[in-house]
Amino acid sequence: MTAAVSLCRAALCFVATVTASIAAGPTAGNGGHQEETFDRRLIAGKSVTYFVVDTYNHRVMEWAHCAQKGKVAAGGHGKGSKLTHLSFPVDIAIDSNHQNSLVIVDRENHRVVEWPQGATKETKGTIIVGNEKGKEGSSLHDLSRPNGVTIDSHGHIIVADTGNHRILSCQRGHQDCTVVVSGDKNKQDGKKGCGDYDVRSPEDVEVDAHGHYIITDKHYDRVLACDGMSHGHIVAGGKTSNGEKCKQNCYGSKFNELYYPEGVAIDENGDYIVVDSYNNRIMKWAPNATEGERQVSKKADYGSKLSQLHLPRGVVVDQGSYVIADSMNHRILQWIPGAERGELVAGGHGFGPKENQLHLPDAVAVLHHNSMAGACTPLSTSSPMSLAFSAAVMVCIVVLASVS
């Protein structure tokens, strides 16, 4: 029994030493992306709150820093057309000019609505564009299955009006929006297009530092930059191997191709971070690049491991990391570019309506706070080392108790 006790104590000491070493980060000559990812996550900057568009639960969820579960920030009453409800919301922007209100694309109600911070179950959304009945339309104050929203430097609400094949600029208090980019379908009406490029069913829109509209043109498997004055060019995907504009069957998995891109973000260097959804990867395209660089999910397959994605739908760039709506895995990941795996920050407990669950999340927005971020207990399942340590502790407790 004395030998068993000695062995048990030695094993505990060894496992504890290894665990402490992992937590402390890499040592000299001990490179490796996974340890680097963990260490860099601990020294992240500002504390943040994640606002997750929980599409199939018809709600927006608020996940605080290090939270194990979220709380409803908008909707949450099931599908409906009342202003207390949402119906398949798909995108979100935070308006810093309006007390950090939530600007939400309420797709199946064909409108964009605004919800204040700290909403309760009785809180109603306010319509920015669309109508109270939740009916689609093509007038300048109606929408048809919108999918994307952002806010430009002037405070205008920029909407990807997908079903109407156009990008709108809208202002609070103005009944009608302004068409700033339009597809070929609408050009006979004298509305602005994107130079020589048709914009068909735009999936998402962002605005870069030059005021150009960066449009995820999913139908043609490309991303366009349009200046709103009938000039534009391709910034990702959408070209043949010879560099010519692709006209049909433009999808693919090569680094110069995209396959049903769902959204785009712009990083601090002006690079385009593209959600290449059907390729289950996040790609970075530098301005004027002929091909992209894989940043997230290095294997050419999908899955549920933290090293994989499955039909990602949205991405934002936050303090050098990517925050990804990993749709079919019902979770939100924070991923340092080039790292072997991401870190779970919301969801990840299967699909469902519980406070710790999501159901096909479509987008995420990040709100910064003045406080600095502290280290979090990972939301992911326990690692093999932590499980081994726990098992060793339990066994040794029994052994030591038997000889005490």
Image: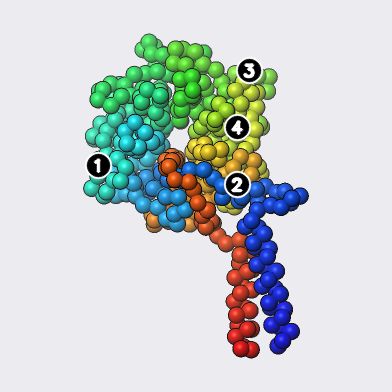
Residue behind mark 3: 244
Task: Give coordinates of residue 179: x percent, y percent.
Answer: 37, 18
Mark sitting earlier along the chain (4/1): 1
- Horizontal side of residue 297 vs 266, given as left or right: right
Task: Give coordinates of residue 219: x percent, y percent.
Answer: 50, 28
Mark sitting earlier along the chain (2/1): 2
Q: Which of the 4 image quarters holds residue 336?
A: top right
Local secondary structure at mark 3 = loop
Residue behind mark 1: 124
Q: Mark 3: which amino acid?
A: Glu
Gap between marks 3 and 1 measured at Cα: 49 Å
On residue 284, which mark appears?
Answer: 4
Local secondary structure at mark 2 = helix
Q: Residue at x 63, y 30 (%)?
A: 292
Residue behind mark 2: 40
Closer to the eye: label 3 or 1:
1
Is there any visible trace of residue 222 in the rendered image?
no
Q: Mark 1: which amino acid?
A: Lys
For this rendering, which residue is in front, 353 or 286? 286
Gap between marks 4 and 1 measured at Cα: 38 Å
Gap between marks 4 and 2 measured at Cα: 21 Å
